[in-house]
Amino acid sequence: MQLKNASQQNQNTNTMNIDKKNLITIAIAVTAGLLAGWILFGSSSKKEETEQSSTIAAGHHHEGEETIWTCSMHPQIRQPEPGDCPICGMDLIPLEKEESSDDPREIRMSPAAMKLAEVQTQTVALRVPSKKLRLNGQVTVDERHVFSQVSHIEGRIEELTVNFTGQYVSKGSPLAYLYSPELVSAQEELLEAERSKEEQPQLYRAAVEKLKNRKLTDEQINDIIAAGRPQQQFPILADASGYVTQKLVNQGDYVKAGQPIYTIANLSDIWVMFEVYEKDLTWLKPGDMVVFTAASLPGKTFHGTISYIDPLIDAKTRVAKARVELPNPELALKPGMFVTGEAECSLPDQKERIVVPHTAVMWTGKRSVVYVKKTGDDFVRFAMREVLLGPDLGNSYIVKEGLMPGEEIAVNGTFSIDAAAQLSSKPSMMNSEGGKTESGHLHETMTTEEMEPMKSSNQTEVNTKSEIFEVPQQFKQQLTVFFNQYIKMKDAMVETDATKTASEAKKTLQALEKTDMSLPKGEAHILWMQNLDVMKKALQVISQSKEIEIQREAFVNLNPILYRKIKAFGLEGKTVYYQFCPMANDDKGAYWLSNEENIRNPYFGDMMLECGEVKDKMDF
């Protein structure tokens, strides 16, 4: 039994030894396999892992970079998140880091920044420029159809058959009856000659001819002979058909032969006389079509071509007359009616020229600049370029120098591009050499040199840049309050009352400072802020001075800036007239705004109260 147990123990021991050997063998094989795998693949896996880790690390670093948000109007604002500018309320824009460029004067913008700034571009092309001229005119009689009805005999008016102006008369109808001693004698001579006409035919013919010279007809002469006695009253017959526009005599008046007694006008054809400003004369020519309406005939439109342009310019109003001739069979158009017309005009030579929209041009008072687009990478680059402008076409300009056909320019969002240029210390509208400006505003006060064209040049051209912006109604209300106060100040200047002018100017300045500059957004805000300092300084000078001439000199600088802002933003229920006097400002010309069409000159007052002309009319 003991031997059997010992044998079994030995067998179990051997079995355990075999299992241990197998386990050791398997473990060695697995370890060898892992070692071989590490030798073959370990280094490359580690390399991939290292590269992947580097890539992830780089990605985390890129994503971790903070985007700085700034204000295009106040670049001193720096925020890590988008939002509104705490100063003016404009939407903040991302601050782009400027990279190296072949041209250090160029400003680079990403597609996202362009979209945010609503930048639009257009290719420069040649075309025959045309312009729509707005013309004001008045219906007048055709001067070729105006007749003076005279008395062909001398005598006393016994009866008038036409007693008021506006009465229609037909040719040959009696207008008045005269008693004429001279005509009575001539009739007696006729009757005497008629009795002896067989013996003295020459005497008879002479007597008949004498009556015919006094416009008596053969029928009237035969009636006298048939009656056998002179007529005591003789009719004056109308020489033409038409409407009596003037009645020059009364019953009982004694008139001489050849004296006018009525003016008669035939209104079946009329003239419309349009006023053409001196600066527009190069555009208008005979043959141009004019479409016009009359306020007293709503719903009716009239067409006519210009037949004649007056070669003389009125020295006071600086306008010439352009005539349109029209048939008027229904007499709808009556002399004295005011009309408003529009003419599509082109330059006489019909040459193609470079034309760009108003919105593409930034005007500083001295320089005109555009932004030219350049491409070449994932970013768009713009370079500022000065241009020489030609005539204003209303919504566009002719460019004489500075651009070539095929170039691409910004036509919308130009203020935003200029803002980015200033943020990067690049050449900009207000800083042609580049570099940092002392103030964050793009709307720095104009330098003396830039203000010079406003102060000293002959201002015969109106800057009619046509930016129109939608602004909150609250802002329009505030601007209307300011304009109403401006009119009071202007009227005080018309009265040549320096004390009252200063008082009203102080209130005008207060009204200006109460306008909330944060209400207009984007480019509207930029335009409002532009040259606002100039307006405030002008009002300060006017309010602090007691000398009317100093006040008027400051007033010169205020008006072109205010005109542009009102034209862009509008007022509440107002009609505004932009008026100009060529003799103000030492014969250099000056503008002002008014709420009435009649000229009331603030630069001369009673001395030359009506000197000036309306340059623009704005209906809101």
Image: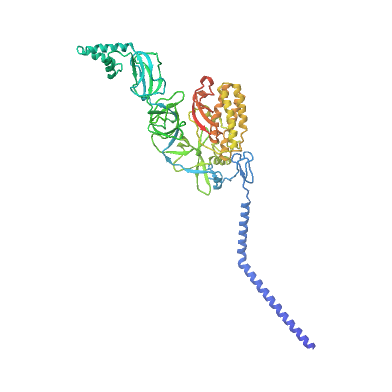
Viewer-closest of 291 and 525: 291
Rendered-image quadrant of the N terminus: bottom right
- Taking the image as shown, residue 191 lies to the left or right of residue 92, namely left
Examine the rendered structure and indicate whether residue 592 appears above or below residue 176.
below
User: Quadrant of residue 76 in the image?
Assistant: top right
Q: Across the whole image, how many numbered discs are drawn on residues?
A: 0
> Foreground residue, 27 or 371?
371
**Left or right of residue 187, residue 528 in this image:** right
Q: Going 76% across and 85% down the picture, which residue do you hit?
A: 8
Residue 19, x across and y down, in percent: 70, 79
**Image spot of residue 477 (x, y percent):** 59, 34
Query: Hey, which quadrant is residue 216 in on the image?
Result: top left
Question: Residue 474 occupies which quadrant of the picture?
Answer: top right
Q: Is residue 169 above or below residue 189?
A: below
Q: Nearer the viewer, residue 35 or 489?
A: 489
Where is residue 575 drawn, in percent x and y? 53, 31
Please indicate, yes or no, whether residue 100 appears anywhere in the rendered image.
no
Q: Would you say residue 502 is visible in this rendering? A: yes
Q: Could you tell me which residue is drawn at 50 percent across and 46 percent down?
A: 375
Give x and y (percent) for residue 539: 59, 28
Query: What colouring method underlies this structural image?
Result: rainbow
Given the current orientation, which residue lies at the most extreme right position? 2
Point 48% across, 43% down: residue = 122
